Amino acid sequence: MIQPQLKRIAGNAYRMMFGLRPEVCNLQETFYGWVVFVASPGSRKAVVKFSREIGRLAKEVQGLERLSQVLTCPVPEVLFFGREEGHDYIMLEWLDGESAHNLPDDPVALEQFRESYTDVLLALHEHQSQKGFEIGDDEFVPDFIQAYESWMSPVLRYVQSSCSPFSSKLKDAYAGLWENREEILSPLNQIASLVHDDCHVGNVLFDPRTYKVAAIVDPCDVGFKHYELDLFHLYDVRPDLRLVERYQEKKKLAEGFEWRRWFFSLWDDAKHSRNMGWYDERWLVSKVALFEASYAGR
């Protein structure tokens, strides 16, 4: 079992940072790896993260740094980036707050959070790049379709490869999505916005006293993209919060978001499959059907 080893590494990192043994050392498994919460009474609390994907932690460090410069709410400070017993890890500050996944079913609480979080996202998306859409380190293109092709062409090659787990039915479906990408994405050729890239409410903390956003954590591939690449994630967890609907009340979306949300979600799932080996045939087939039904009604 890898968990005892990771807890030991996290405990060693905490002792190195704070000079004492943690009395709390709780490990949780996540989609991309493991998180260990370490603390001692009267001392600082910290979070130690490990990733299954090579290079993911370096991206998170860069993403947190970029977000810390522009977000109107806290993000975790990176205390250090380490390696022990063959495992890379990062130690982050432990921010106070509760996961927004656990927001109480209270109208006042939901309204306070809904208003607060959409304001945070709108402020983030106001940070725009005149250079265009970001496809690499200091590399930009002026056209969103060209950028999306750069981001997702490797994912398409994976889906269509003989070694991928995707069925013939799904390979055909993804080929059709790709063939229609220009028509689907053409309304989005506009200024690029900075995005978190995984901003579902499971990655948001709220203040249990005010129900407003307390912090945002766990960015994915932060960069200047299009703000709709954040918005479709808002359906991933607690869609009952109706965050996209509130966002739309404050900022008009280009025509076609109702089918682009499924397009983006399908390619995001394929990216996760490529990165982590995840695959769920039934889930993907049902999502293709939702895209096709929405797109047919345009």
Image (cartoon, rainbow, N blue to C red):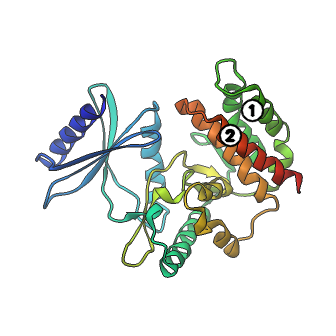
Q: Are marks 2 and 1 in contact (CB under 8 Å)?
A: yes
Q: On the image, which quarter does residue 166 sit in?
A: top right
Give the alpha-carbon distance from disc 2 to disc 1, as whole Å. Answer: 8 Å
- Which x, y percent locates residue 232? 65, 55
Dot 2, crowdedness within 10 Å: few (<14), some or many (≥20)?
some
Asked whether 30 or 86 is in front, the reply is 30
Identity of the amino acid at label 1?
Leu
Mark linked to residue 284:
2
Q: In the structure shown, which secondary structural element does the residue marked by tag 1 occupy?
A: helix
Side of 283 where 45 appears, left or right:
left
Does 101 sit above or below residue 198? below
Horizontal side of residue 150 vs 179, given as left or right = left
Closer-to-camera residue (265/64): 265
Q: Can residue 151 be seen in this view?
A: no
Q: What element carries label 2?
A: helix
Give the image quarter of residue 139.
top right
- State the image coordinates of residue 131 (x, y, percent, origin top left): 67, 51
* x 47%, y 56%: residue: 203
Query: Where residue 142 appears, x then y in whole percent?
Result: 74, 48
Give the residue at mark 1: 170
How many neighbours does mark 1 have within 10 angstroms: few (below 14), some (14-19), or many (20 or more)? some
| Outermost bottom residue | 108
Which comes sooner in the sequence, label 2 or label 1?
Answer: 1
Split into 4 quadrants, where in the image is the N terminus? top left
Q: Which residue is drawn at 82% across and 62% down?
A: 255
Visible residue check, residue 266: yes
Query: Of 220 and 269, which appears nearest the observer?
Result: 269
Residue under the point 38% across and 64% down: 98
